[in-house]
Structure formats: structure tokens, C-alpha cells
Amino acid sequence: MFETRVTKLLGIKYPIIQGGMVHLSRAPLVAAVSNAGGLGRLGRVPGDGGQQGGRPGRQIPGLGQRQG
């Protein structure tokens, strides 16, 4: 485990924070980053009224399935 102030504060394994990349930060990417020990973030798609990018984490498919 790589331990820094950021990893302690956020409760993550690695100090990797995925940026909100508008059209690319969908649920599968967020789940993959989070499951790998980083901090995944949903991006907002312009014109969706915030609906697609605003789903609570507990509803993201695959979230919580840690990778090797």
C-alpha cells in the first residue's frame, strides 16, 4: 500500500484521482478506477440536465468489486 496524506484522507489505496472527463467519465470507468484503489469521479454530459453524471455511487454497476 502506498500511504500519503491524500490516501489517508480519502480512504483510497493509491493517490490516483481520476478527473471528470465530460463524455468519458461514465460508470464503468469510475468503477474501474475506484475498484483499483484510486478515486473515480463521474463526469457530467452536456445537455443531460445532470442526470447521468449525478447517480449516487451505490448505483454504479461493478463498484466495490476490487481487482486483484
Image (cartoon, rainbow, N blue to C red):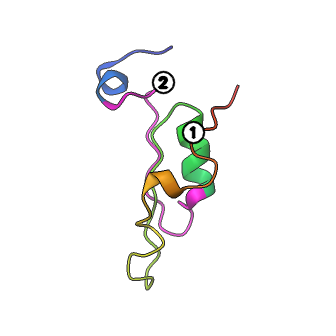
Q: Which residue is mark 1?
A: 64
* Mark 2 / mark 1, whichever is N-terminal: 2
Residue 20 image offset from top left, x and y in percent: 43, 57
Q: Which residue is mark 2?
A: 13
| Callout 1 crowding tier (Cα within 10 Å): few <14, some 14–19, many ≥20 | some
Q: Main secondary structure of the magenta part?
A: loop
Q: Residue at x 33, y 21 (%)?
A: 8
State which region is magenta: 10-27
| Secondary structure of the residue carrying numbered label 1 | loop
Q: Amino acid at mark 1?
A: Gly
Q: Is residue 18 magenta?
A: yes
Above/below status of 23 relative to 68: below
Left or right, 65 with respect to 8, comes to right
Residues under labels 2 and 1: Cα distance? Answer: 13 Å
Q: Could you say which quadrant of the image residue 60 lies in?
A: bottom right
| Secondary structure of the residue carrying numbered label 2 | loop
Above/below status of 13 relative to 55: above
Q: Which mark, residue 15? A: none
Residue 3 image offset from top left, x and y in percent: 40, 15
